[in-house]
Image: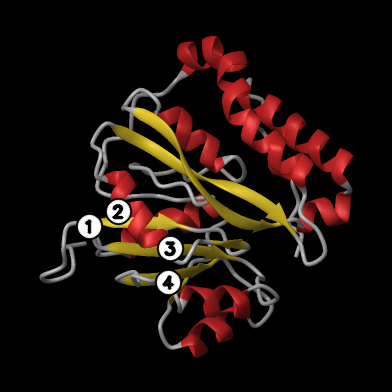
Amino acid sequence: MAPLANSPVDAVAIVIPVLNEAVVMPRLLRLLGILDPAPAEIIAVDGGSQDNTAALVRQSGFVRLIEHAVRGRAAAINRGVIETRSPLVCVLHADTILPDDAVAVIRATMQDPRIALAGFIPLIAGAERVRWGTTFHNWIKTWYAPLIFRPHYSSRAPSPVRRSRHVLSPFGFPCRGRLRRDTYVMEDADLCLRLFRRGRIRLVNRTVTTSDRRIAVWGGLKANLIFLYIGIRWAFGLRHQIEHHYPDIR
């Protein structure tokens, strides 16, 4: 799809894959409405919600709704990216809150042509507490996981993706590329693997706040063990039905 008429080369769109997110949508929509500068487009891609997620998006008046029943968050993300017309696209999880100046941060980050992927630092929190332990583990994992699995990645890494028009942000992660349509979990890690040969991967010194809803249900120890188990299976190619170990929690 052609860029917006007369739009600057750094115009940013936000794409949000959603599925039964009625609980978090009011807060997300409220905070998206105060982003400064504002994005050129905001698109929510609904994967078949059974609650009133779609109605809330329509009522917002400033978010475009796309209904896309194809299974998987990666498929929803790709559909949203295809539908955008801005040169830069930020894909955002519905339970993740961007800083007010996120558009400016994305523009500044992606001006560097050497960067293939960059990410905000996710701060995992709920209504009553911040999950400092899991937040720290997620941060340190961005350093130790590549060191542990680099030889395995290097021998199995797919060819870099060809399309490079967009900025994707699955967890507040801006980058250039597209996702595998058959990826149901670990889509952000898959994208990292597909892009690491194209340039630098940078962790931006800014945070996004993301929901602790899985940890609240599973408990901290169980949640981190599940995250680790899924990550190891994914890294070694044991990905068949891996999503069964990572059910939706709303």
| Earlier sequence position, callout 2 versus callout 4 | 4
Q: Nearer the viewer, mark 1 or mark 4?
A: 4
Q: Tell me the tag on residue 107.
A: 2
Q: Which mark is residue 35?
A: 4
**Lower sequence index among marks 2 and 3:** 3
Which quarter of the rendering shows the N terminus?
A: bottom left
- Distance, label 3 to label 4, CA atoms, is 14 Å
Residue 45: x %, y % from top left? 48, 67
Instruction: State whether residue 80 appears in this view.
Output: no
Q: Amino acid at mark 1?
A: Asp
Residue that mark 3 sits on: 15
Give the spatial CA distance, label 2 vs label 3.
16 Å
Q: Is residue 171 above or below residue 50?
A: above
Number of residues whose C-alpha sits closer than 10 Å to that of mark 4, classed few (under 14), some (14–19) or many (20 or more): some
**Spot occupied by residue 53 in the image (x, y as percentages of width and height):** 61, 78
Q: Is residue 196 left or right of residue 230?
A: left
Q: Looking at numbered disc 2 in the image, what kind of residue is underneath it? A: Arg
Q: Mark 2 to mark 4: distance in Å?
A: 14 Å
Q: Earlier in the sequence, mark 2 or mark 1?
A: 1
